[in-house]
Amino acid sequence: MRRTRELLFQIDTRKLELLQTPINQLDLKMKGTIFEEAIPAVQADLARVGIKKLEPVFYISTGYGCIAGSPIIAFGFYDCDPLLKDLNEEFRGWRYSDAEVLNLLRHEVGHAFCYAYKLYRTPEFRQLFEVQGNFFNTYPEGEKYAFNPWSRNYVNPSGDHYAQKHPDEDFAETFCVWLTPRSGWRRKYKNRPIVLQKIEYVASVVEKFSKETPLIETNMAWMYERVEDIRMTVAQFMHAKPSRYYHRASGYIDPDLKAMFRAEPRIPNRRALYRDYLRAEAFLREHKQSLVTRVAYWVGVDTVCVFDLMDKCIHRVKALNLWLEREQLDRKLVELTSYVTAMCVRYRESGVYISKGKNG
């Protein structure tokens, strides 16, 4: 990687930018992530065991889960990018491996199957999984739960005794063990009759309902905490302090861009919004080529010095969703030209875009 891009896009800078970016502006995609492989793999697992009619819906959210009473499955945005995975481990203390993600999805599909065919209403399910009272309303608040580490009545594939949290989790964990290829559950649990009874129950209800239409309709409006709706920054979500990265970030220009442009105006009428305002991204793209040519000539630097800086600016104003007033286009062009020129002069004189300590 050439030095200009290395300075502007180095890891500490990108981590700082991610922490300061609103979650709904991360522009996350499944393509290129573990989910691009894991979701088809789980769907193949369902097909392998003959589940034909259940079609879970997957979406990106603030964590893993299945919408109660619906086959809608969420997974954590923090597993959609390698740097987000690093930040999650650094500030929240855990990191899922690819194998763990696959099992998490199998677990959630277990919930989806249970809800789709309303198994929790049947006497056999309630007796076997010890349901007391309302199935959903008795679910414990928070992440903490009591468990007996010596109990032989539950599967424990992840070593966290999660099946003991609630009958809902007991079934989903059992379903995951049964669904996982080559899990060796017959051998592993051969001396645990209650566990075997639960796994065999899973096999029996799958055989019974595998070709049946689900008893519920999927309502997309039930999706909870979609990343598109989360306005808090990654730092706020992770309770992280970005300050540790300031002195190491050699390409952090967000404060400059926020000073030059503005947040999206709160104008419900989209026609009025685009009549009076312009996205900063569109503004920068319009003037990128002319600035690259002219600033490189005026300052006496290679065009890549300006090109990479403009590329960085475009990338960040898009992530930050910055705008400008149309009546200020000329003034903002002067500001932008001055800013890019000053940054390139600094690079020519010192070999860096940002002086040491500027972000401190």
Image (cartoon, rainbow, N blue to C red):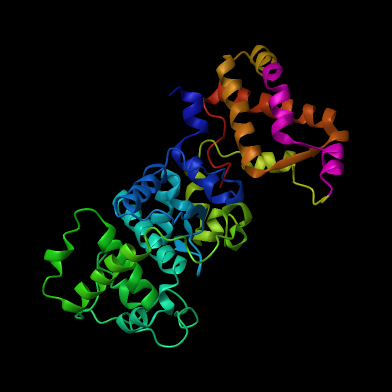
Residue 176 screen position, x and y as percent: 30, 62
In this view of the protein, which residue sits in the foreground, 326 or 164?
164
In the image, residue 4 above or below residue 281: above
The answer to if 195 sits in the magenta stretch is: no
Residue 7 screen position, x and y as percent: 49, 31
In this view of the protein, which residue sits in the foreground, 122 or 19?
122
At x 81% / y 44%, what residue is drawn? 270
- Is residue 96 at all visible to an observer of this figure? no
Tell me the quarter of the picture where residue 218 sits. bottom right
The number of numbered badges drawn on the structure is 0
Tell me the quarter of the picture where residue 255 sits. top right
Q: Quadrant of the N terminus?
A: top left
Left or right of 39? Residue 197 is left
What is the chief secondary structure element of the magenta stretch? helix
At x 51% / y 42%, what residue is drawn? 29
- Is residue 291 at all visible to an observer of this figure? yes
Residue 38 screen position, x and y as percent: 37, 47
Left or right of 140? Residue 355 is right
Q: Which residues are magenta?
A: 269-291
In the image, residue 71 above or below residue 1: below
In this view of the protein, which residue sits in the foreground, 128 or 142?
128
Left or right of 300? Residue 119 is left
Residue extending farthest to the bottom is 133
Left or right of 27? Residue 175 is left
Residue 286 screen position, x and y as percent: 73, 24
At x 68% / y 24%, what residue is drawn? 341
The answer to if 275 sits in the magenta stretch is: yes
